[in-house]
Amino acid sequence: MSKATIAVIAAMSAGAGAAATAARPAASVPIPASQVFANTAPARHPRPSRPLPDRPRPVNPAGLFEYGFPGPVADLATRQAFISSYDRRTKNPHWVAEHFTPASLAQRDGDRKNSTFLEDPAIPDKFQAKLKDYFRSGYDRGHQVPAADCKWSQKAMDETFYLSNMCPQVGEGFNRDYWAHFEDFCRRLTRSYPSVRVVTGPLYLPKRDPGDNKWYVRYEVIGNPPNVAVPTHFYKVIFAEDGASAGGGKVALGAFVLPNAVIPNDKPLTDFEVPLEAVERATGLEFAQKLPVQRRKRLCAEANCSIVVKEYAERQKAFAKK
């Protein structure tokens, strides 16, 4: 990730602080002597006025709800292996949250050869991502919860193939390479932690236009008609739990933002580590507001945050359809 991108994520909330600072009066303006040496007689406080009786309003905006609630609707889905929130506007998930353990990863009752990509019938038809939207788009149907995390059950694995768990991802060099190695890194954390939780989702980050030096959010849209947004970046927030007594153990937190682009396999994973607050500002989501600071640890301070390169592209060539 470029330094400019990290700066964008970290500074997304700086404008509000600057505006507040600008609104403060300058400290160098002298105070008039008449205000310093004014009459010191006690000030008279006006009597509180009586509350005015409620007057009938001539409008009723809530009457709209008799016809329906506009939204937004998150389409929250609870699957066997994960929970997800779907964004009807972009046809991508807002986020997906999964949990795996050494025991769940050791089971082998599911095989992706038996799974099929499916449109999600739980999403209203006009808001669904369609199989035809991805056809010849040049992008992979990129799992947000990986099928490999759900081998403990064929049904659990099948549910990862709903398009509501997909985003358009660059194939070679990302989804079938660096991103797959990153997913493997998350699974390998179970060698050190008995419980791992991961939240994954898309981002649409601004980029500076060299023509006018202004920042714009621009992303491709695929489908016919065009309706499925292609994210510019993806995030993962990782909670590696030490398994101590419920509610009192330490949690190693890690937040990462990766571009939806070809990434060389020799790129250090730590180059994509960002503060958790940066992901929260970029997404408008909160991930750990109930986790006390004293229980938090930095994941990459105690774990080896690096990928192990495996040849996923060759093994999954039959399944990675563009």
Image: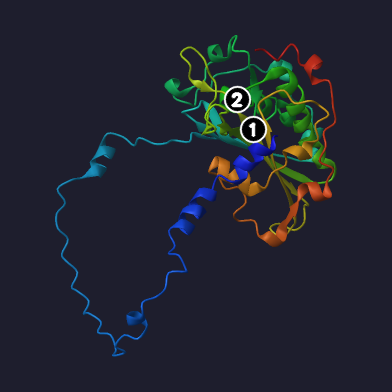
Q: Dividing the image into 4 quarters, which one contains the N terminus?
A: top right
**Left or right: 243, with 221 as reference point:** right
Secondary structure under the numbered disc 1 in the rendered image: strand
- Quarter of image, res 79: top right
Q: Nearest the camera: 133 or 208? A: 208
Few, some or many C-alpha atoms within 10 Å of disc 2 (few <14, some 14-19, many ≥20)? many
Q: Amino acid at mark 2?
A: Cys
Q: Dividing the image into 4 quarters, which one contains the C terminus?
A: top right
x, y (%) of residue 78?
57, 36
Q: Residue furthest top?
A: 136
The residue at 47%/68% (across/down) is 27
x, y (%) of residue 62?
26, 44
Q: Earlier in the sequence, mark 2 or mark 1?
A: 2
Secondary structure under the numbered disc 2 in the rendered image: strand
The residue at 60%/25% (across/down) is 167
Tell me whether the residue at label 2 lies in contact with that at label 1, contact meaning CB atoms closer than 8 angstroms: yes
Q: Nearest the camera: 229 or 292? A: 229
x, y (%) of residue 86?
52, 32
Give the labeled residue for mark 1: 234
Up/down of 49 relative to 319, above or below? below
Few, some or many C-alpha atoms within 10 Å of disc 1 (few <14, some 14-19, many ≥20)? many
**Left or right: 259, with 76 as reference point:** right
Give the labeled residue for mark 2: 167
Asked if one can make out residue 204 in the rendered structure from this viewpoint, the answer is: no
x, y (%) of residue 242?
78, 52
Q: Amino acid at mark 1?
A: Phe
**Left or right: 31, with 230 as reference point:** left
